[in-house]
Amino acid sequence: MLLLGLGVGIAIALGTFATPVDAVAYWLAGTSTNLYPADWSAVAPGYLFYPPPIAQLSRLIQPVGWQVFIVMWMLVIFASFWYCARRLSLALVAIGIPYFLGVGPDAPATFLSYALLGNIQWPLAALSVVAIKRPASWAVLLSTKVSTAIGWWWHVFRAEWRAAAIAAGASGLVVGLSVLLGPDLWAQFIEFAVRNGNFADPPMPLFPIPFWIRIVTGAALLFWGARTNRAWTVPVACGWALPALYGLGFLPFWIAALRLTDRGAAEEPAESTDDDR
């Protein structure tokens, strides 16, 4: 409750006195008519680097107003923060706030900056844990930071076909509905993704290990984890596979993995049955 109260206080302050740039980008995406820039360097209010579902959802919630949105969104973020870190959450906040204020939000390892900037990182990290037992959750990761849905392969590598099918069906439903409602937005997004697929000239320095290496090693880690019943490899691989990895952006996912290290073999997906194998 203390952490959620802190989230509300920060949300009110941010909504009134500051600019949580990532939350602003999500909000303005609901009013923008030109979502995707020519390249990564063209950062401006109203631009989005995510697939269209975020913009389409933002359009739906515009009537609630910015103040309500930022408070509710911060509650989601700080609830996700608590879910991922649990007993470590207050210690991380105690370390993160002075570091954030002293060094600035763009410095590497400012894991708290993802919360204070309103980024979706913590909710996705939480979902990378939830999705092990609730595979439909992979649809959210796929429709936002696409490659973080690499964790879906956990089910395939374990021959959990029902769970894999539920995840694929939910993802197909979300993407299909989004395409039906905004085919023009998807055309713009695909054009942007193809044009900038090499991640040249990003708005901030990227983690020095190339994306393709991270995808390959993340898949290998998942395979090993799936075959040896190490569920913590799922959020680790999801964070490692972030498409545009700024600084140490994988940290929220790796912190979330700590939830699974104590339970190991106990983390059996709810959707798994003997018939699936």
Image (spheres, rainbow, N blue to C red):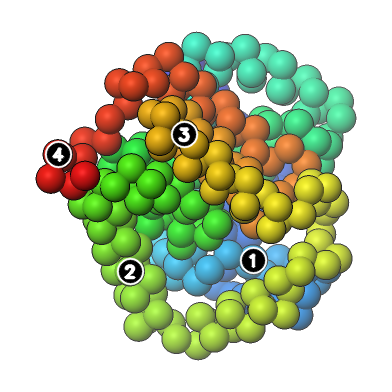
The amino acid type found where label 2 is placed reads Gly
Q: Distance between the residues labelled 1 and 3?
A: 31 Å
Answer yes or no: is residue 136 visible: no
Q: Earlier in the sequence, mark 4 or mark 3?
A: 3
The amino acid type found where label 4 is placed reads Asp
User: According to the image, label 3 marks what residue?
Assistant: 225
Counting from the top left corner in percent of width and height, residue 183 is at: 45, 86
The amino acid type found where label 1 is placed reads Phe
User: According to the image, label 4 marks what residue?
Assistant: 274
Q: Is mark 2 on a helix, strand or loop?
A: helix
The mark found on residue 172 in the picture is: 2
Q: What element carries label 4?
A: helix
Q: In this view, does 208 lie above or below 269?
A: below
User: According to the image, label 1 marks what residue?
Assistant: 49
* Occupied quadrant, residue 57: bottom left
Q: Distance between the residues labelled 4 and 3?
A: 19 Å
Q: Earlier in the sequence, mark 2 or mark 1?
A: 1
Q: Which of marks 3 and 2 is nearer the N terminus?
A: 2
Task: Give me the residue at 86% from left, 25% from top.
Answer: 102
Pick the quarter of the image with the N terminus. Answer: top left
Q: Is 121 placed left or right of 224 in the picture?
A: right
> Pointers 2 and 4 in contact (CB under 8 A)?
no
Q: Is mark 1 on a helix, strand or loop?
A: loop
* Occupied quadrant, residue 64: bottom left
